[in-house]
């Protein structure tokens, strides 16, 4: 789902495979886009076919993972309500292919092409705001809500494309997604690694997906760590107002699913952040703003990545979890494992012993 739009000539370098001229703009795209008049689109929408959404000229933000480029009157970039991809721009160009020479477009805004140049525009409403009636969710409540959401998301995925599921060696996030497809009786094909050095150059996530020229939707667990309370730094921020130090909590266990991963990648990092926030509203809003700008995976070529964890509404629910639930999830993946147990208990035996196979 890579695009670059400019009022200057564009070179067709990877990942772009085609360049079109629309009105006065040059448009570079990767494979897999569909054109309807002066509208280009790619991805999937929950509860309706993305094609129908485009034909209806319904550009409201809905759940899914898609982008719509509308050149009918002026160039506009539309996307789902959780925007899975980064954007950056200068006066001449906007793209979601990272360019450090350009200005980032954070999640609280978008860009519009006005008066011959690209300009940043804030969202009309504030997406992330600490609820005035803030109440905690316990583990059972969070699992209930997440299971309901995943089932709705899976059943609402309207597509004629086949589903592929890459072997993740027992990754808990991908096992959650696999389990909801099992629960809903949706068929999928298991596939094993098939990638290219070019694809890997797009970012760490693209090293992990199965790539083929066969159009398909691939089940993934991307953003599970960050948006379902298993990124230790994010959880440390959320626990700060309760005077909880994650290092002390991990040290209570000789073994846990996340301990080796935490010790290797996050113990020193989290140590620098303990006590950063004294109030829960500040911790909540800071964590949410960082998390929604943690872009990981969007579509590439003919591979459409199903990314149900990339959902801002559900992430904000997770960030309301009570401290015990957060600790259970960040140390043991307790919430994720309970979701799997409810949706397909047989899959619990397939979960790896350690996160990313990093032993304690």
Image (cartoon, rainbow, N blue to C red):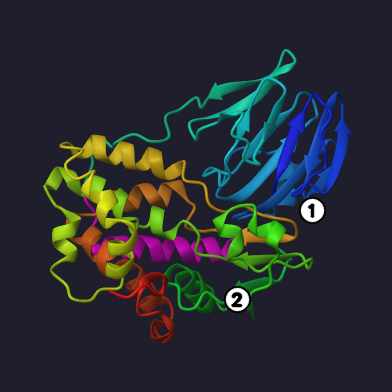
Q: Is residue 320 visible?
A: no
Residue 186 numbered mark, or none: 2
Q: Position of residue 12 (x, y in %)?
A: 83, 42
Q: Position of residue 146 (x, y in %)?
A: 39, 62
Residue count near mark 2 (Cα–Cα under 10 Å), binned few <14, some 14–19, many ≥20 = few
- Examine the structure image and report whether residue 138 is included in the region drawn in magenta: yes
Q: Residue at x 70, y 22 (%)?
A: 113
Residue count near mark 1 (Cα–Cα under 10 Å), binned few <14, some 14–19, many ≥20 = some
Q: Please tell me whether the stretch drawn in magenta is mainly helix, strand or loop.
A: helix
- In the picture, measured across the screen, residue 314 lies left or right of residue 237, that is right
- In the picture, measured across the screen, residue 59 lies left or right of residue 127, that is right
- Disc 1 to disc 2, C-alpha distance: 26 Å
Q: Residue at x 20, y 40 (%)?
A: 280
* Tally of numbered tags: 2
Residue range of the region highlighted in magenta in the rendering = 136-157
Q: Residue at x 45, y 71 (%)?
A: 176
The quadrant in which residue 193 appears is bottom right
Q: Residue at x 85, y 40 (%)?
A: 19
Q: Which residue is mark 1?
A: 31
Q: Position of residue 23 (x, y in %)?
A: 87, 26
């Amino acid at each position: 789902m890579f695009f670059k739009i400019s009022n200057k000539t564009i070179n067709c370098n990877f990942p772009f495979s085609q360049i079109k001229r629309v009105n006065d703009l040059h448009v570079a795209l990767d494979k897999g886009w569909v054109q309807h008049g002066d509208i280009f689109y790619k991805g999937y929408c929950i509860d309706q076919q993305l094609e129908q959404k485009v034909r209806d000229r319904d550009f409201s933000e809905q759940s899914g993972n898609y982008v719509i480029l509308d050149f009918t009157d002026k160039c506009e970039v539309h996307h789902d309500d959780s925007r899975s991809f980064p954007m950056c721009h200068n006066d001449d160009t906007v793209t979601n292919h990272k360019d450090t020479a350009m200005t980032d477009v954070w999640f609280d805004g978008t860009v519009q092409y006005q008066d011959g140049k690209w300009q940043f525009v804030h969202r009309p409403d504030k997406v992330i705001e600490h609820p005035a009636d803030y109440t905690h969710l316990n583990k059972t409540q969070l699992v209930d809500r997440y299971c309901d959401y995943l089932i709705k998301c899976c059943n609402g995925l309207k597509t004629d494309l086949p589903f592929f599921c890459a072997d993740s060696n027992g990754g808990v996030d991908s096992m959650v997604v696999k389990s909801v497809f099992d629960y809903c009786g949706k068929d999928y094909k298991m596939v094993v690694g098939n990638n290219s050095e070019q694809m890997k150059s797009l970012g760490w996530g693209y090293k992990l997906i199965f790539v083929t020229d066969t159009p398909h939707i691939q089940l993934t667990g991307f953003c599970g760590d960050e948006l379902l309370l298993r990124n230790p730094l994010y959880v440390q921020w959320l626990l700060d107002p309760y005077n909880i130090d994650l290092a002390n909590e991990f040290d209570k266990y000789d073994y846990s699913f996340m301990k080796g991963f935490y010790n290797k990648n996050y113990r020193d990092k989290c140590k620098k952040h303990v006590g950063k926030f004294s109030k829960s509203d500040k911790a909540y809003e800071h964590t949410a703003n960082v998390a929604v700008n943690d872009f990981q995976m969007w579509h590439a070529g003919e591979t459409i990545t199903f990314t149900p964890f990339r959902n801002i509404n559900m992430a904000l629910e997770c960030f309301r979890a009570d401290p015990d639930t957060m600790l259970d999830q960040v140390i043991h993946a307790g919430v994720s494992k309970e979701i799997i147990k409810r949706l397909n208990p047989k899959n619990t035996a397939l979960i790896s012993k350690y996160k990313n196979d990093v032993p304690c």
